[in-house]
Amino acid sequence: MRSAVGLITRNDLIVLVKRNQRTGDPWSGDIAFPGGHVKDGETPQEGVLREIAEEVNLNLSPESIIFAMEPTFSMKMPDMPVYPFILKVDSFNDIAPGPEISQVKVVSLSDRKDSRNPINGMPAYDFQGWIVWGLTYRILKDYISLRENSGVLP
């Protein structure tokens, strides 16, 4: 089993989702990037584009993917590789939560505050009350570092 997530960006803005509460979903209720399981026969790139369409109503082309980060692993499912992709969009006009998502929020990276997860004390970012921690925090932290040090990423 594999998963893919999309860090969707435009300038200083990124898309975060709040997942619905669902029994059996290890990320139930979490703040995350749009994404999910890659289906049999799909590439991680195809999976992330499908998941983005399903979760936030953005139908993006493969050309929207501007960078593939190294696969990583969640502490909740350490045997499942997660493929993070950075995608650039021109607009967030059509963004809307799909059936698995309770809310979608476009946030500015400059508005993040260093924080801690109130449940387990792990490092986190706070975006106006939306706490990003765990796998999403690590991916976002790596993206911010790449963005600041590469001069290439938006």
Image (spheres, rainbow, N blue to C red):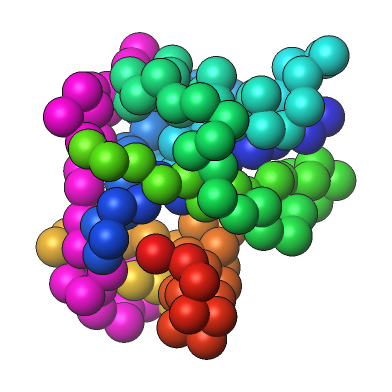
Of 100 and 92, which appears nearest the observer?
92
Is the residue 75 above or below the residue 54 in the image? below
Quadrant in the rendering for residue 12: bottom left
Is the residue 69 above or below the residue 8 in the image? below
Is the residue 84 above or below the residue 147 in the image? above
Is the residue 106 above or below the residue 29 in the image? below
Residue displayed at 23% across by 27% down? 95
Quadrant (top left/top right/bottom left/bottom right) for the N terminus: top right
Residue displayed at 55% across by 42% down? 65
Of 49 and 17, which appears nearest the observer?
49
Residue 60 at x, y percent in the picture: 44, 26
Q: Is residue 86 magenta?
A: no
Residue 121 at x, y percent in the picture: 44, 76
Quadrant (top left/top right/bottom left/bottom right) for the C terminus: bottom left
Residue 10 at x, y percent in the picture: 29, 52
Of 134 and 69, which appears nearest the observer?
69
Over which residues does the magenta segment extend?
A: 92-120
